Image: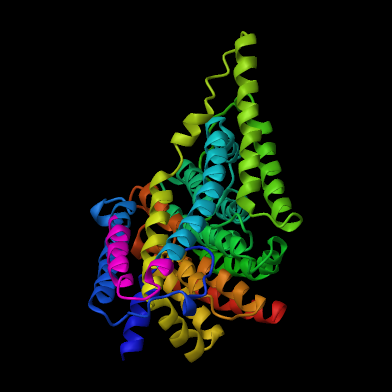
Amino acid sequence: MKALFISLLLFCLSGTSAVAAETSMSNLNMTSSTFGIAALVIFILAYALVIAEEFIHLRKSKPVLLAAGLIWILVALLAKSKAQGKELLEHAIQHNLLEYAALLLFLLTAMIYVNAMTERNVFQALRAWLVKKGYSYKKLFWITGFLAFFISPVADNLTTALLMGAVVLAVGSDKPKFVSIAFINIVVAANAGGAFSPFGDITTLMVWQSGHIDFFGFFALFIPSLINFILPASIMSFAIPNETPKGTNETVQLKQGAVPICLLFLCTIITAVTFEQFLHLPPFLGMMMGLSYLFFFSYYLKISGRRSAENIGEFNIFNKVARAEWDTLLFFFGVIFCVGGLGTIGYLAYVSHFLYDGFGPTNANVIAGVLSAIVDNIPVMFAILTMNPQMSDFQWLLVTMTAGVGGSLLSVGSAAGVALMGQSKGMYSFFSHLKWSWAIALGYVASIYSHFLLNG
């Protein structure tokens, strides 16, 4: 019972650093101590506040940052009782800091590019173009779904969901039923699309940076991810009204430099992949080099704006840095150091032995996907990476997919779902999503089955 209790607590309410550590050789093995139990309770309380963010409106970074500090105080006190505790403590801190720095620099570059494209009206122009076409509700359902599926591998699932959600609201604000089902479809599509690309979700990014799967290896999940989206979408499409919304004549003009910035972002992705695949350098170095492309281009825009009589609007690259999702980035810091601390105490080695040795990797990985619907998929994947169970590439791909698409089972299981609940003005809610969870579950099972058929 003790093993089951600790396993459920840690797997349901845990997060950790990006790259796996040898937990069996780098922990204090003091899970039964008073300070060890206190650290676990602190993290559970902090993550309970994270889960309740939608209701209490407390930003998720705040409780985990406090918890991280408190947990490492307890870890330091425990380390004093061990002969090599000081060395182990220093190693654990350096390891967690290194992995967070790699994550921070990679994500910061991606966020700056997305913000730059937003400021140059790239996404707004796409939304206006779709609205002006005058498609029927059913066509818009499929168009926004497929766009979400194919944009999220590059622009991440959260940004994609918000963009497609704006399209749906623009044409269907007077059809709450359509908005609700279309939003569910967007969440499923964005999460599924993010599962087969290292850039599509934080979970896939972490698996890529950990070295378990190389860049091109993720594309083996394309067909299973597509099935995960297509099956529930086909079922839900029967509930879409056979009507056509009124079109609009809204036109959004791209600002100067919009297209070059999109191309520079593509070049940045290519640079990161080249660094990892051919030079065996960490991808964040390639992303930071790609950021320099945008810095030089912003300088060009500044100079050309002075020389031109046309007012192209101020383009300050450091404003894009300021507008990055700092709450998310600080949340990752708190999560990494919270469960990095729990791993140092010895909890993750204990859970890894119980789950992966007891249930086997396939069952454990499927369970991880279901749990990611209750808890955000990022902490679930971080916990698995720190446990570092011995698995084949097939199993690492399986858990990458299940953790990514499993979050679609509930609206609170992914950042895309939570964001669209806030955007929908009450038309898309936890219970409206829950109504179609059975169809999404069919897609979840079908994607796992197809992965076994195609890649097993």
Q: Is residue 431 above or below residue 243?
A: below
Pick the residue in front: 245 or 261.
261
Residue sticking out furthest to the front: 83
Residue 186 within the segment the image draws in magenta: no
Residue 417 rendering spot, x and y as whole percentages: 43, 57
Residue 224 rendering spot, x and y as whole percentages: 64, 71
Q: Quadrant of residue 346?
A: bottom left
So how many labels did they put on this image? 0
What's the coloring here? rainbow
Residue 160 rendering spot, x and y as whole percentages: 54, 49
Can residue 226 be seen here? The reply is yes
Q: Residue at x 57, y 14 (%)?
A: 311
Q: Quadrant of residue 209?
A: bottom right
Q: Residue at x 41, y 83 (%)?
A: 350
Task: Locate residue 34 relative to residue 380 in the image: left or right.
Answer: left
Residue 85 within the segment the image draws in magenta: yes
Residue numbers of the magenta segment: 66-88
